[in-house]
Image (tube, rainbow, N blue to C red):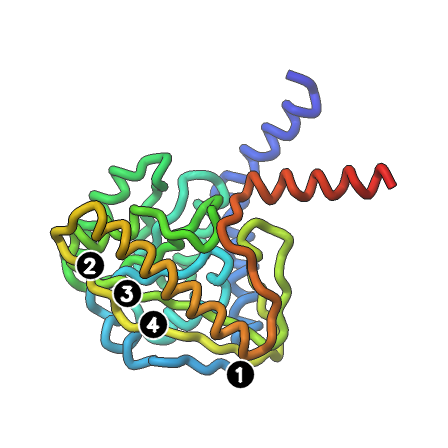
């Protein structure tokens, strides 16, 4: 292993330690609260959040639309539990959400610890007093495509799926596969809470796949309708982190060749 690679490996390990991540999480929590208090926020269908503040539900949001939903969940006293990936980014996000009231974090994705996470999540939902918050297209895409895990949580627990999304008048879209939306201070923010979607405990594979596509379409329409309010650009669908990085490398090579 080259010296540069060793240094990068050590640096990544260091950045994944709790002693480093907690101060960073605190910094971002303060920053998010600052943005929130300087913005004018309107929550559509807030009665749904109130209804499920202490009831089992699966709150789903696209990976790129998580920033301003954390303070909203906190202010509506949602008893939440977060689902995060096991990598350092996932653990950082779990720490940040804990500062916004998430009482517990479940670590696992479809490819890493998914079965264990599913069991833990279902047990939490079956207790009947809190919801789970998850990004169904995370942690690396495809963007705006729901993975099967979300439906399994709902199917096995009986908890409904509640799609939530936000948009803003002064956006900064990061150059990432998920087009992560950062709301700038003094923006107008709109948060939409979708109607709860029940998931039957017994379904054929065809019914399961059809329901997944239907929820996909509901969440995409939710985002498109919100973004249209401020005439924001159309965020890409079905994009993975790997594909996005390869595309960016190709663009850089084109610029250099010119």
Q: Which residue is mark 4?
A: 194
Q: Which image quarter: residue 162?
A: bottom left
Is disc 3 in contact with disc 4, using a CB cutoff of under 8 Å? no
Q: Height in image: 88 above or below 24?
A: above
Q: Secondary structure at mark 2?
A: loop
Residue sitting at x 47%, y 46%: 141
Q: Secondary structure at mark 4?
A: loop
Whether residue 38 is visible: no
Residue sitting at x 29%, y 57%: 132
Q: CA distance from mark 4 to mark 1?
A: 20 Å
Horizontal arrangement in the rendering, residue 143 relative to residue 230 (left or right): left
Q: Which residue is mark 1?
A: 40
Give the mark nearer the N terminus: 3 vs 4.
3
Quadrant assignment for the N terminus: top right
Give the mark nearer the N terminus: 2 vs 3.
3
Q: CA distance from mark 4 to mark 2?
A: 15 Å
Give the mark nearer the N terminus: 2 vs 1.
1
Q: Which residue is mark 2?
A: 199
Q: Which residue is mark 3?
A: 79
């Amino acid at each position: 292993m080259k010296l540069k690679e060793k240094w990068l490996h050590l640096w990544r390990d260091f950045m994944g330690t709790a002693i480093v991540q907690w101060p960073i999480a605190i910094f971002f929590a303060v920053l998010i609260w600052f943005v929130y208090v300087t913005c004018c926020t309107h929550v559509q269908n807030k009665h749904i959040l109130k209804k499920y503040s202490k009831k089992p539900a699966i709150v789903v949001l696209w990976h790129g639309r998580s920033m301003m939903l954390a303070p909203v969940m906190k202010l509506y006293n949602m008893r939440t539990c977060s689902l995060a990936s096991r990598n350092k980014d996932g653990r950082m996000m779990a720490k940040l959400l804990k500062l916004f009231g998430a009482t517990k974090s479940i670590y696992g994705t479809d490819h890493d610890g998914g079965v264990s996470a599913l069991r833990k999540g279902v047990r939490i939902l079956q207790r009947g007093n809190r919801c789970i918050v998850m990004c169904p297209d995370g942690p690396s895409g495809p963007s705006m495509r729901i993975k099967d895990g979300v439906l399994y949580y709902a199917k096995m627990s009986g908890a409904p799926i509640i799609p939530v999304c936000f948009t803003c008048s002064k956006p900064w879209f990061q150059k990432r596969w998920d087009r992560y939306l950062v709301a700038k201070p003094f923006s107008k923010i709109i948060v939409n809470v979708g109607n709860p979607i029940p998931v039957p405990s017994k379904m054929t594979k065809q019914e399961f796949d059809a329901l997944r596509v239907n929820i996909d379409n509901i969440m995409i329409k939710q985002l498109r309708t919100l973004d249209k309010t401020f005439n924001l650009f159309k965020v890409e669908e079905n994009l993975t982190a790997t594909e996005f990085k390869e595309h960016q490398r190709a663009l850089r090579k084109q610029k250099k060749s010119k």
